[in-house]
Image: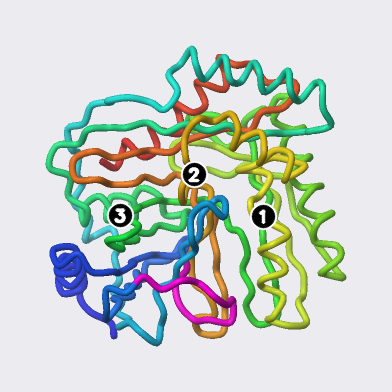
């Protein structure tokens, strides 16, 4: 059911006040915003990838995967255009980080040493930054994200047992539509300075190639004909990344679970080899990522699946917002530059608070 903006966001506000489950989201470069309003307050586990609905899945199995099911929800939509836009800017202050600057740089240094003495090619190290926000307006913050990050998957997920999460992810995990599979290799970061015509260093080009090659190697046993385009520079908010598009035909929709198992967590958010990198992360990051660097999105809605990596995201708790950020570490990483990259990324989310 398509509604005007006022009625759509009024229904979302009612769900927030009642503390009952919902998700609202917009796909990349689109103007239509969808909402799934769950009819009960049950927490529904994702038991099968044949289910239909919006899924919300963690980085590791330490948290459960959930779904807001189409069969148990009301679906609404609205169109949000620039003419509807009213910019919001809240007052906020940084409270703490799971790892402060020196601690993070020390961890990067030990990560580089670990990479040099093992066969691990890349490890993604992250941290969480807690920000105090005065009188945060969830609806206006979401609308800010819609306008500021048009080339990202923008979402707001709420369940009283998982909390409120919001984000604007530039990274697609998988799309399957009409027998065509799409994913991407997204790696390397630099600040946007007004142009896409930029130079990338050896470290960034190496990181992008490692990620692309790893994804292709994992997909080959499942998909027969794979095509790539890239790498090329893309803008995501105030940041630039290197991106390679990967496409193939799929014979069966039942390959979704196989593809997710092969790709999640991606090299862009975990590292490679995957299991070795994940083990290092879990033993050294010193905090729980929860749903950051997990995946989320439409599962078997209108005969298509659109899943995204949960990047550029934040967890909202009353007046405290936790922003999750990280970066890919290779043998040539410089700790101070890696810290600066996380600062750039945290600013992406702060600009919409």
Residue at image coords 56%, 55%: 61
Q: Looking at the picture, does residue 24 appear above or below residue 290?
A: below
Give 348 or 110, whichever is nearer the viewer: 110
Q: Quarter holding the N terminus?
A: bottom left
Q: Is residue 314 magenta?
A: no
Q: Are marks 3 and 2 in contact (CB under 8 Å)?
A: no
Residues at discs 1 and 3 in contact (Cβ within 8 Å) = no
Labels 2 and 1: the sequence-earlier one:
1
The residue pinned by badge 1 equals: 184
Residue 146 falls in which quadrant of the image? bottom left
Name the N-terminal-most of marks 3 and 2. Answer: 3
* SS at badge 2: strand
Q: Could you tell me residue 326's position as x and y percent?
A: 53, 34
In which image quadrant can residue 221 be found?
bottom right
- Asked if the stretch drawn in magenta spans residue 44, the answer is yes
Query: Do tag 2 and tag 1 residues touch (Cβ < 8 Å)?
Result: no
Q: Quadrant of the C terminus?
A: top left
- Residue highlighted by disc 3: 164
SS at circle 3: strand
Q: Of the residues under marks 1 and 3, which one precedes in the sequence?
A: 3
113 or 269: which is nearer to us?
A: 113
Tell us which disc is closer to us: 2 or 1: 1
Magenta stretch in the rendered image: 43-55
**183 to 145, vertically: above or below:** below
Residue position marked by numbered label 2 in the rendering: 236
């Amino acid at each position: 059911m398509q509604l005007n903006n006022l009625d759509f966001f009024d229904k979302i506000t009612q769900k927030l006040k009642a503390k009952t489950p919902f998700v609202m989201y917009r796909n990349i470069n689109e103007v239509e915003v969808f909402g799934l309003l769950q009819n009960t307050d049950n927490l529904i586990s994702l038991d099968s990838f044949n289910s239909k609905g919006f899924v919300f899945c963690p980085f590791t199995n330490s948290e459960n995967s959930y779904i807001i099911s189409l069969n148990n929800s009301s679906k609404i939509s609205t169109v949000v255009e620039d003419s509807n836009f009213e910019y919001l800017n809240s007052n906020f202050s940084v409270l703490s980080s799971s790892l402060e600057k020196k601690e993070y740089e020390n961890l990067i240094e030990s990560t580089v040493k670990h990479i040099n003495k093992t066969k691990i090619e890349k490890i993604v190290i992250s941290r969480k930054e807690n920000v105090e926000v005065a009188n945060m307006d969830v609806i206006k913050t979401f609308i800010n994200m819609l306008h500021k990050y048009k080339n990202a998957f923008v979402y707001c997920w709420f369940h009283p047992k998982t909390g409120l999460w919001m984000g604007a992810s530039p990274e697609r995990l998988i799309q399957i539509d009409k027998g065509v599979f799409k994913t991407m290799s997204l790696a390397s970061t630099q600040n946007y300075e007004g142009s896409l015509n930029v130079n990338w260093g050896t470290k960034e080009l190496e990181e992008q190639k490692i990620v692309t090659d790893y994804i292709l190697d994992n997909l080959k046993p499942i998909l027969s004909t794979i095509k790539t385009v890239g790498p090329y520079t893309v803008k995501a908010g105030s940041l630039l990344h290197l991106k390679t598009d990967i496409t193939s035909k799929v014979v069966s929709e039942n390959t979704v679970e196989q593809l997710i198992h092969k790709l999640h967590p991606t090299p862009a958010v975990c590292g490679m080899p995957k299991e070795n990198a994940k083990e290092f992360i879990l033993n050294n990051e010193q905090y729980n990522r929860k749903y950051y660097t997990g995946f989320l999105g439409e599962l078997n809605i209108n005969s298509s699946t659109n899943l995204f990596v949960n990047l550029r995201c934040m967890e909202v708790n009353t007046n405290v917002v936790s922003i999750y950020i990280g970066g890919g570490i290779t043998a040539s990483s410089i700790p101070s530059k890696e810290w600066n990259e996380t600062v750039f990324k945290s600013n992406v989310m702060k600009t919409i608070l």
